[in-house]
Amino acid sequence: MIDNLDMLYDIIDHVNIGMTVLDKDNRVVFWNKFMAKHSGIHSSDLLGKNLFDVFTYLPKQWMELKLKSVRLIKNYSFVSWTQKPYLFRFSHSSMIKGNGVDFMHQDCTFIPVSDPLTGDIYVCITIHNMTDVVISQMKLSEISDINKTLEQITNHDNLTSLYNKMYIETQIQQEFNKAKRYGNIFSVLFFDIDDFKGVNDQYGHLAGDEVLKKIAETMKKHLRQSDIIGRYGGEEFLILLPETNLKSASMMAQRLRATIESMTTQYKDKEIKVTISLGVVQFRPDIKNASQMIHEADLALYHSKKNGRNRVTLYKITGCAAMKTPG
């Protein structure tokens, strides 16, 4: 126990937190060196003065209510920087520069202190410098945003905003591994735009880009949340259909084919119509890897192209089986 009051006072005066004590009229009766250093006002120039007369920028109405409540209830009150970034406009000397934090961010505690002689309730306000914590959190948030941007760039196709070839192949491989291990069922759908070169030749490459974007947008609207679609390259697209057998996948393929057939892309004063050809394959235990599965879907797609376009072909062990296209 410290019996020497001068020693105790010296400790309080030198701790690396701000501390000031206000009497019942909110006059300053104690102002430690932390407060003096960061405010630029020495305690000898402040003692006996009303806090709000000196620091006119303080939220007087809010703070007077806070002080009154602490005196009345005789209980602590804590104010985090997340609620109110700061009370005192103190500058900071954070080691982290270029942070956009103008003033020292502060955690503040209002502590009731009773005078044993008079019974008056003083309020001790402590100020903890939280600026480095705030800036670190800001940096972490910035890093998180950068990582999200990098992930978007790495995994997505720039034109259509669909997943790119690398990502969709990875997802199919992961689904393939699960199917091999647990016996899950899934299917892959491969499609491309019929005579896309003709669209570019007739309307121009910018028009072709609009068609690609329109197809991507339309597909996302008509797929399930669990389905994953990616642009495989040029006018080719891959769709992963988890927990989907060949029959369900073929029905999905026909719906998508019909949807694109009825779709119109507006480009300037032109209305562009296109169709797609599709190949569908279901996972089988004899398939060696995801690449083979994609290859089989591609063979089925080629069969659709070869047999008139705007149709769906299913890949089976016995070969490709074309589905009858309505209309």
Image (tube, rainbow, N blue to C red):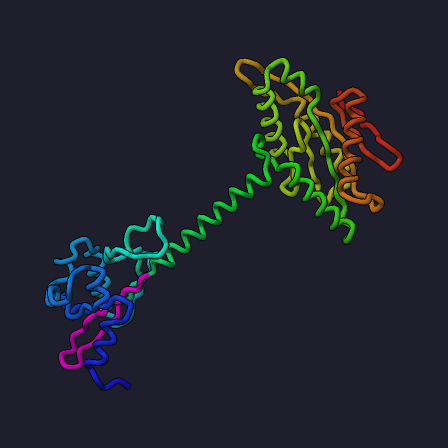
The answer to whether residue 18 is magenta is: no
Tell me the magenta residue range. Answer: 110-129
Residue 254 vs residue 103, the one in the foreground: 103
The quarter of the displayed image where residue 155 is located: top right
The quarter of the displayed image where residue 312 is located: top right
Query: Residue 143's x, y, as percent?
Result: 47, 49
- In the image, taking residue 17 as reference, residue 311 lies left or right, namely right
- In the image, taking residue 187 as reference, residue 124 lies left or right, namely left
The answer to whether residue 128 is magenta is: yes
- In the image, taking residue 139 as reference, residue 73 lies left or right, namely left
Query: Residue 68's x, y, as percent?
Result: 20, 65
Determine the residue positioned at 68% across, 24% down: 193
Position of residue 7 relative to residue 190, above or below, is below
The quarter of the displayed image where residue 62 is located: bottom left
> As drawn, which residue projects farthest toward the right?
318
Determine the residue positioned at 36% across, 58% down: 132
